[in-house]
Image (cartoon, coloured by chain):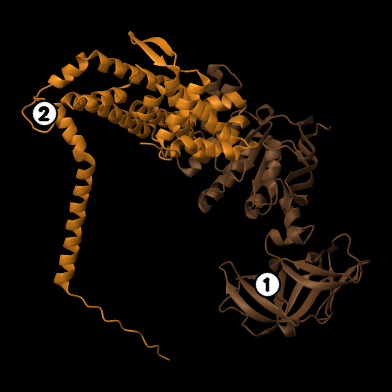
Amino acid sequence: MTTQTETTEFSYHPRWEQFKSKLGGWSLTTYGILAFAFLYLPIIILVIFSFNESRSVSKWTGFSLHWYSEMFQDDRIMLSVWNSLFLAVVSTAIATVLGTLAALGLERYQFRGKTAIDSMFYLPVIIPDIAMAIMLLLFFNMSGIGFTPWKVQFFGVKLAVPYSVIIGHVAFNTSFVAIVVRARLAQMDRTLEEAAQDLYADTWRTFQRITLPMLMPGIIGGALLAFTLSLDDFVITFFTSGAGFNTLPVRVFGMIKKGVTPKINAVSTLMLAVSLSLVIISILLRTRSGDDETVQMGF
Amino acid sequence: MTDTYAVELQDVVKQFGDVIAVNHVTLQIHDGEFFSLLGPSGCGKTTTLRMIAGFEMPTSGAIYIHGQRQGYRPPNKRPVNTVFQNYALFPHMTVAKNVAFGLEMKKLAKEDIKRRVGEALEMVRLSGMANRKPKQLSGGQQQRVALARALVNRPEVLLLDEPLGALDLKLRKAMQLELKALQEEVGITFIYVTHDQEEALTMSDRIAVMNNGIVHQVGNPEEIYEHPADRFVADFIGETNFIPVKVVALSPAIVVELNTGERVHAGWAEEGLAVGDNAVLSIRPEKMDLLEPHERPQTPSHNIALIQGSISHLVYVGTDTRHTVTLRDGTNVVVRLQNVYIGEEPWEIGEETIVTWNAAHARILKE
């Protein structure tokens, strides 16, 4: 018995097919270039004009480091830089400890109300900054705590940082750290901890020798993310700082109100450089640890 | 209670919610013994091992290690070490650091640790790999690191949870022999969990066959294979024919009747069977033979079973051929005959035959 095979006519014109495939290649390349230009052209222009000689931010007149020296001589900008750095260091340190502990608690233990607390941790990530800023502002106003500044020497610079801003930054950073560390923790093989216990390590030593080192890439990733977020934050800082306290983004906002000069470009380039270095550090740490199971979040 | 056993389980029960993982298990494991817990996945063998290690606490019952009741003693305070199924090597430490971990936790002197780690790595022939990370090793090498990491502590009992499961067949066979040799060399009690019956038969001094949380039989490999205690063991270990029968007599001789009306004697009957009960006759395919109808003995003996049938299927498997014979009631039995013939396979499909076996090899088991 023979079965009838169905024949389909395929129209095939070699030149047309060749043209189509070339056209596809070209349009994909063009699209790629345009997409990247859209993303990075403003940044490139910003960086270029920070080196402009004249006051103009749109007309190139010649190369100069004038605006950078101006920036470094501006005491108010430099103070805001130190404020930003101090705030980022302190809030990251606190948030990293709290976030890591929260991640361990949420991932490793069963308790009443766990689901509720779990979702609450995502709240600062999801809700708009402005909502969180207003909530914090109202809280500090009502409770009457926080706006008193913490007077401190940081690398020889005298700073006065309101506790409210630190608390505000810790509040959102803790969530980010917790989420990043939890992702790492969820991937971790629990039998490793059992193996350590089996080899006579008590709970603390198991944590110290196994859990913590295994979590380190996640903790560092979370800390770097928190640091960058803290450096970049405008809205929450602006609302919670009260009068007279400026971080770099808040300072830039103040300057723009008086007109844009290439000094702002220079400041922005500096911030860009810091953020970029943090990303590079995190990538280097990731490749150096040689741990290909690591999927780090953030950035 | 008693100090003659390396590990003793008394009426141990483990429940996870509504599920009974281990159901009234009592075991005595001798010092220096290679003891296997064998059963299909989910039979409770790993849970039993984890209770001995201290990762799980029994719901009821008691566990003794060298006469010492373990109770709620945590794993780090028990004189046992475990080789995990996935090895659980610490990925951020070198091979040497992995092996040294237990000794460091015991706070031994630095020189002692160094010497013993060296010896342990030598024992598993990995001396050159001391400074590698676990990821840079092959599966078999990782397996040996896990072994060294456990044995370096000189535990009273070594627990192994399917340690060869992740290796390919050839490596597994080699490691089976290596493990057995190692166990004889160090003289430590091994408790070995596996679902691979061949592995258990090859390596063990004694085996406990488990299913659904219950220990069905404990015995040495030969006992387990030749004298299975019940239908589960007979079915799980090796290949067996089950022929439905009715018990006709139990003493002085055990006699059963097949559905075809043919009567045969048997060597052993499971406890609790009574005359008139339905049961199964269990017989291994290699214990049977085939006769041409004209070869039927003139003087029948009680010791020799002779059952009529016809060849329905032949499968050539190298060393022997599996002959499927359909009895007159439609029951299929498999007879394995070694391929010692000269020329062509002597049997062909459809041919009438007589299946025969020695009555002593037949065991009557509950359905």
User: Which residue does the image show at 52% across and 21% down from the upper left?
Assistant: A143
Left or right: B359 as drawn, with respect to A68:
right
- Residue B334 got which mark? 1
Which one is nearer the viewer's eye here, B100 or B340? Answer: B100
Name the spot of residue A87 as percent of width and height, x first: 38, 20
- Residue B155 got which mark? none
User: Which residue does the image show at 16% across and 25% down from the upper left?
Assistant: A261
Name the spot of residue B12 as percent of width and height, x first: 78, 42
**In the picture shown, does residue A65 fall above or below B166?**
above
Q: Residues within 10 Å of mark 1 (few under 14, many from 20)?
A: many
At mark 1, the secondary structure is: strand
Q: Colour of chain A?
A: orange
- Residue A56 got which mark? 2
Please check whether the numbered discs 2 and 1 fall on a single chain. no
Amino acid type, mark 2:
Ser
Q: Quadrant of residue A72?
A: top left
